[in-house]
Image (tube, helix red, strand yellow):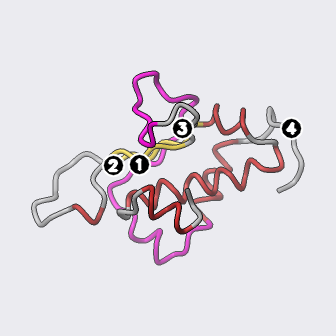
Amino acid sequence: MSLVNKETLDFYKLVERALEGLPPELSSLLDNVAIVVDDWPDYSTPLVSGGPEETLYGLYEGVPLTERGAGYFGFLPDKITIFRGPLERDFATQELEEQVRITVVHEIAHYFGFDEERLEELGWG
């Protein structure tokens, strides 16, 4: 990533590049899922990992593909939210694009049914 000022960095483009970097065989399986950017998590947003030292960079809300049965139809889209504020606060400009990519992949993995423990084992925790 080129060195640019965070104020001029288009965070949405970082998320877009992360999505474009997904293997086509995975991105083609993304169905009925909205991927959005929000500034900060709401105070009421549960921290899935639960520790006070944990920072929420992204959140998957929905029914993972591995839990969908034959009766899964007519549902609102699942939602993946990437939180700009915590990411920009915690990572230097030159690290930000990589961390956005990690966060996007992490949340998409939840969509595919991976839990936190498995993501840790794979190095995407």
Whether pointer 3 and pointer 2 mark residues with C-beta atoms closer than 8 Å, the reply is no
Give left or right: position of 7 versus 88. right
In the depicted structure, whether residue 53 falls above or below residue 31: above
Q: Amino acid at mark 4?
A: Asn
| Residue that sits furthest to the top in the current view | 43
Q: Which residue is nearer to you in this view: 23 or 96?
A: 96
Q: How far apart are the alpha carbons under marks 1 and 3?
A: 18 Å
Whether pointer 2 and pointer 1 mark residues with C-beta atoms closer than 8 Å, the reply is yes
Q: What percent of the width, then of the height, locates residue 105?
A: 54, 60
Please give the name of the residue rendered at 33% of the width and 49% of the height, measured from the top-left corner.
Answer: 78
**Lower sequence index among marks 2 and 1:** 1
Q: How far apart are the alpha carbons under marks 3 and 2?
A: 18 Å
Whether the magenta-drawn stretch holds residue 48 is answered as yes
Q: Residues within 10 Å of mark 4 (few under 14, many from 20)?
A: few
Which part of the image, by quadrant, shows the N terminus?
bottom right
| Residue that sits furthest to the right in the current view | 3
Q: In terms of secondary structure, where does tag 2 sit?
A: strand
**Lower sequence index among marks 3 and 2:** 3
Whether the magenta-drawn stretch holds residue 78 is answered as no
| Residue that sits furthest to the bottom in the current view | 25
Stretch in magenta: 21-50
Query: Which mark identifies residue 34?
Result: 1
Q: Nearer the viewer, mark 3 or mark 2?
A: 3
**Lower sequence index among marks 4 and 3:** 4
Please give the name of the residue rendered at 78% of the width and 50% of the height, measured from the top-left corner.
Answer: 95
Q: Which residue is nearer to you in this view: 87 or 26?
A: 87
**Residue placed under numbered mark 2 in the picture:** 78
Q: Amino acid at mark 3?
A: Leu
**Residue placed under numbered mark 3 in the picture:** 56
**Residue placed under numbered mark 4 in the picture:** 5
Which part of the image, by quadrant, shows the C terminus?
bottom right
**Lower sequence index among marks 1 and 4:** 4
